[in-house]
Amino acid sequence: MLLKMCFIFGQGKEHQKRIIVDVGHGGKDPGAIGINGIQEKDVVLAIGIEMIRLNKSIFGDVYDIYLTRYDDSFFTLSERINLAKSLRGDIFISLHCNSFYSDARGMEIFTFNSESKKVDYNTRTSIALGNEIIRESTHSINIANRGMKFANFQVLREMIRFCPAILIEVGFLNNPVEAVHFSGSSGITAIALAILSGISNHSKSE
């Protein structure tokens, strides 16, 4: 059913670079909860949907974008990973938000550091892609740069074998400034545009 939903909502153009956007949490799992009750699951879904819209309106529909959910539904981590594998994307991006203390702010991006030579290319490509997204975000919307990092997250550990894979923590929902930014449509558009611009910059450099 999840795969069927993605083919209904996805672009389905085989000649395009396919981007799988894993929209974190959903349904009974709200993820991080920030100021004024803003929920991670809602923020990342809005970003994913806006990426699809901007891909069509600004980037000339150059990418074939699929989300792992298109509404406030709950799917297990394994279900989302299996879907991403079956879609055979060229890039895997998992969207999340941070929550720590009110002064913490900024974007950080993770990938998996595998020692396998077989996936070494995907790891290097993930680092380059993540750096472009961070660079674009810090330049265009002045978000703080918390850097590229390595983590043993399941989505990264399993997806890096198939394609470049990154997990983006777009910002901190309990930071007063960033919570307001992600509560409005203009903030959602800005971060979605920065992510797509970073992908575009990286694609041009390959």
Image (spheres, helix red, strand yellow):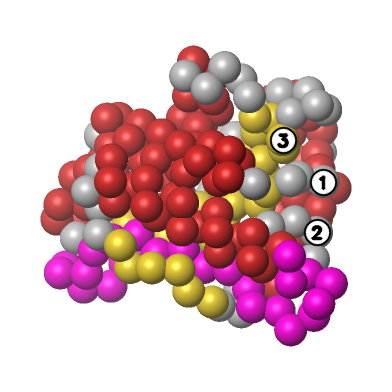
Viewer-side residue, 62 vs 88: 62
Q: Residue at 56%, 64% (x, y): give it.
A: 127
Q: Nearer the viewer, residue 178 or 146?
A: 146
**Which type of secondary structure does the marked residue at label 2 adopt?**
loop
Residue 28 vertical placement versus 150 (above, below) = above
Locate the N terminus and report the quarter of the image it occupies: top right
Magenta stretch contains residue 125:
no
Q: Position of residue 131 (x, y in %)?
A: 46, 58
Numbered badge on residue 17: 3
SS class, disc 1: loop
Magenta highlight on residue 112: yes
Q: Which residue is mark 1?
A: 88
Q: CA distance from mark 2 to mark 3?
A: 14 Å
Q: Residue at x 19, y 45 (%)?
A: 180
Q: Is residue 122 left or right of residue 126?
A: right
Q: Amino acid at mark 3?
A: Lys
Spot occupied by residue 22 in the image (x, y as percentages of width and height): 61, 50
Q: Residues within 10 Å of mark 2 (few under 14, many from 20)?
A: some
Is there CB contact under 8 Å for labels 1 and 2?
A: yes
**Mark 1–mark 2 distance (CA, rounded to whole Å):** 8 Å
Position above or below: 102 against 93: below
Going from N to C along the chain, the mark reached first, 3 or 1, is 3
Q: CA distance from mark 3 to mark 1?
A: 10 Å
The spot of residue 203 in percent (x, y) is: 61, 41
Report whether residue 181 is seen. yes
Is residue 81 at all visible to an observer of this figure? no
Residue at mark 2: 162
Residue lying farthest to the front in this orientation: 205
Q: Which residues are magenta?
A: 98-121
